[in-house]
Amino acid sequence: MSDVTNTPAVRLTNAAIRRRMISEFWFYFRQNRGAVLGLAVFILLVLTAVFAPLIAPYDPTVQYRDALLLPPFWQDGGSSAYLLGTDAVGRDMLSRLIYGAQYSLFIGIVVVSIALVGGIVIGLIAGFFGGWVDTVIMRVMDIILAFPSLLLALVLVAVLGPGLTNAMIAIAIVYQPHFARLTRAAVMSELRREYVTAARVAGAGNLRLMFKTILPNCLAPLIVQATLSFSSAVLDSAALGFLGMGAQPPASEWGTMLAEAREFILRAWWVVTFPGLAILVSVLAINLMGDGLRDALDPKLKRS
């Protein structure tokens, strides 16, 4: 018997369905103007991070001792050679901000990837098997959620040791329960549906049911949560960097830049203002994009 699911007609139909789904997604996403603006800023952030070596006018770690705490070019005493001024040891602020985008994207991607994969596996196991397995897993997740996220991350970094890698691991552990609970709720809802019963009757094993049958239908809320967690990861990593527990100097991570500049806040406003604005704009843009994803992926929020 031939495999009718692999015929050209079926493939053409599947491609048409995918195009329609993408078109529908973009239609609802673009209704939210804030989300479109957030997407544009996020794309700009990605391009800045990718092409940082070409865009940045200077090496972010090179110190120019003849240009200490120079103000931006539009202020008295500023220089067009350093458009956003320099910091206390003569490093170009614009170059450090541009390279800081690399840290933010890297941190967000790593943290969300670890938390998403771990949370999905834990949530699938808890929601699919239920019983005492579900009870034990969820009580552990509840214990983690009982602590303030930044405080728990700070404690974990203190145990593991200061550094960017340990900071990312700590933040990922803190965010994992959110993905686990969301996955568990979605799995428990999907288990009652007829397609799962049909797959079980057809002889599908537990792993196939979990990862092939159920998981693809639980991805929409997880994508939204991943987007929002991305911005939170950038913010928390900046907070840890500011406290000296994240990226260490001379790294151009924005939180670390704030920590190095706090003693100059009264006489050199630019060394604090520009990294703070970079964090603010990036987090706001990603949150706006997450709101648009929620509107586009949640059928209950779609407007007719």
Image (cartoon, rainbow, N blue to C red):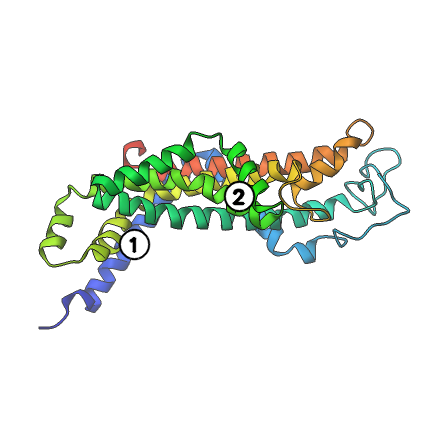
User: Where residue 234 appears, x then y in whole percent?
Assistant: 55, 41
Q: Is residue 22 visible?
A: yes
Q: Secondary structure at mark 2?
A: helix
User: Where residue 304 appears, x then y in whole percent?
Assistant: 28, 33
The residue tagged 1 is 18
Quadrant in which the N terminus appears: bottom left
Q: Residue furthest right?
A: 66
Residue 11 sits in quarter = bottom left
Left or right placement of residue 45 versus residue 290 in this view: right
Left or right placement of residue 145 versus residue 267 in this view: left
At a point 70% along the width and 36% down the height, the residue shown is 258
What is the three-letter code of the residue carrying label 2?
Ala
What is the three-letter code of the residue carrying label 1?
Arg
Left or right placement of residue 58 versus residue 210 in this view: right
Question: For this rendering, which residue is in front, 12 or 170?
Answer: 170
Q: Tell me whether the residue at label 1 lies in contact with that at label 2, contact meaning CB atoms closer than 8 angstroms.
A: no
User: Where residue 256 appears, x then y in whole percent?
Assistant: 68, 41
Q: Residue furthest front?
A: 159
The residue tagged 2 is 40
Question: For this rendering, which residue is in front, 43 or 278?
Answer: 278
Mark 2 is surrounded, within 10 Å at the Cα level, by few (under 14), some (14 to 19) or many (20 or more) other residues, namely some
User: Where residue 202 appears, x then y in whole percent?
Assistant: 10, 58
